[in-house]
Amino acid sequence: MARAFFVHENPDRFVVGTVGEPGQRTFFLQARTGNRTTSVSLEKQQVAVLAERLDDLLDDLLRDDHDQVPAVAPAALEDLNPLETPVEEEFRVVSMALGWDEDESFILIEAQSGTETEQDEPFEDEDPEGPDVMRVQLTPAAARAFAKRASVVVGAGRPSCPFCSLPLDPAGHVCPRANGYRR
């Protein structure tokens, strides 16, 4: 099968969202440019790390006096709408990369699928054996808004047990710290 590239330069929308109930959710990155929408699935932990690293990168840029980097997400860019439907997964994310283009002043987020062949060197874009890729270029303000929403989505899952910190299920919870005992 041919390698697929999904490139969104300054997309109309780039968000993280979920499908399913807490405890059974599937997380998606979704980018829309014009009438072209790309959705890729990933793990909750990948979303959490992406949001954290994105905020860290933006904070570092802010400390380095980059005027175009906002300290907080602009309210005008806040996006609370659900994912656009139908949500059709292009691929499952295995690895991600995050970068800053100094010349163009944009954030680059790249999500890649897995490959059947392993190699020590990174794949070149021209390599037909490489992984599928979703590449998104964002302004610093859009990146800050994305990170804020991603943190909210990750935190909207099941509440944690106050004793063991494992997620509480609606049907009940057998706490390992209480040795399964319920008071």
Image (cartoon, helix red, strand yellow):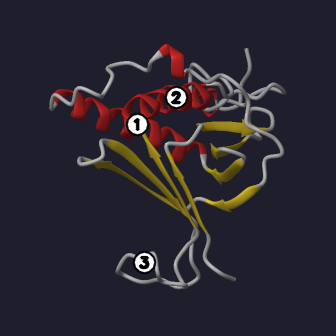
Secondary structure, mark 2, is helix
Indicate the quadrant containing the C terminus: top left, top right, bottom left or bottom right: top right
Could you tell me which residue is drawn at 59 percent across and 82 percent down? Answer: 116
Image: 114 above or below 25 = below
Q: Which residue is mark 1?
A: 139
Q: Which mark is residue 20?
A: none
Question: Residue 69 falls in which quadrant of the image?
Answer: top left
Q: CA distance from mark 2 to mark 3?
A: 30 Å
Q: Nearer the viewer, residue 10 or 100?
A: 10
Three-letter code for the amino acid on which mark 1 is drawn: Thr
User: Which residue is at the far front?
Assistant: 34
Res. 94 visible in picture = yes
Res. 165 visible in picture = no
Three-letter code for the amino acid on which mark 3 is drawn: Phe
| Disc number lying in front (1 or 2) | 1
Of labels 3 and 1, earlier in sequence is 3
Q: Which residue is mark 2?
A: 151
> What percent of the width, then of the height, locates residue 88?
78, 53
Question: Residue 81 falls in which quadrant of the image?
Answer: top right
Three-letter code for the amino acid on which mark 2 is drawn: Ser
Q: CA distance from mark 1 to mark 2?
A: 18 Å
Q: Nearer the viewer, residue 32 or 153?
A: 32
| Disc number lying in front (2 or 3) | 3
Q: CA distance from mark 3 to mark 1?
A: 26 Å
Instruction: Give the mark count.
Output: 3
Secondary structure, mark 1, is loop
Secondary structure, mark 3, is loop
Q: Which residue is mark 3?
A: 123
> What percent of the width, then of the height, locates residue 16?
61, 38
User: Do the residues bearing badges 3 and 1 touch, measured as CB atoms within 8 Å?
Assistant: no
Image: 134 above or below 47 = below
| Mark 2 closeness class: few <14, some 14–19, many ≥20 residues within 10 Å | some
